[in-house]
Amino acid sequence: MKKRNYVTAILIIAAVLIILIPLFGLRGADFEGGDSRGGEMVGEVTGGSYEPWFKPVLETLIGGELPREIETLFFCVQTGVGVGIIAFYFGYLAARKKYGGKNENV
């Protein structure tokens, strides 16, 4: 194997460990985000009468509440996909600018 393949394998293993160690190592940790804290604040301001308008789709499908760790994992995956799409678009624009105007056959 080439040195680049070893580095790639090590980085992939490190990324997987960064995901799995907190997920399984911090069982009792509080992974509460801004959504639930915002709901609590609205409840305090309105006198405790706040009720969410709808339930999350996955909670409806599985018939129960998802663990906070899984919700956090889904949010991180969603963020990663969004960043990937944006980075691809900017890379496309940069490549189009760099290579697009040099067509001498036309």
Image (tube, rainbow, N blue to C red):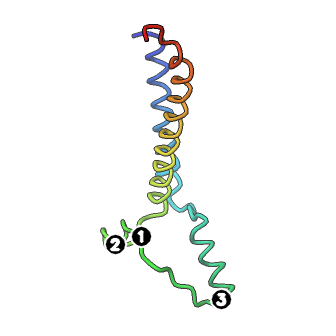
At 49% from the left and 63% from the top, the residue drawn is 68
- The amino acid type of the residue labelled 2 equals Thr
Which of these two is toward me, 54 or 1? Answer: 54
Q: Position of residue 21 (x, y in %)?
A: 50, 45
At 47% from the left and 52% from the top, the residue drawn is 73
Mark 3 neighbour class, 10 Å CA radius: few under 14, some 14 to 19, many 20 or more: few
Q: Are the residues at dot 2 and dot 1 in contact (C-beta closer than 8 Å)?
A: yes
Using the image, tell me which numbered label, if any, was put on residue 56. Answer: 1
Using the image, tell me which numbered label, if any, was put on residue 60. Answer: 2
- The amino acid type of the residue labelled 3 equals Thr
Residue under numbered circle 3: 46
Instruction: Estimate the spatial distance between the alpha carbons at disc 1 and disc 3, rounded to whole Å.
Output: 23 Å
Q: Quadrant of residue 57?
A: bottom left
Q: Position of residue 29 (x, y in %)?
A: 56, 61
- Up the image or down, 2 lies above or below 25; here it is above
At 45% from the left and 54% from the top, the residue drawn is 74
Instruction: Estimate the spatial distance between the alpha carbons at disc 3 and disc 2, rounded to whole Å.
Output: 27 Å
Location of the C terminus by quadrant is top left
Kind of element beneath mark 2: helix
Q: Are the residues at dot 1 and dot 3 in contact (C-beta closer than 8 Å)?
A: no
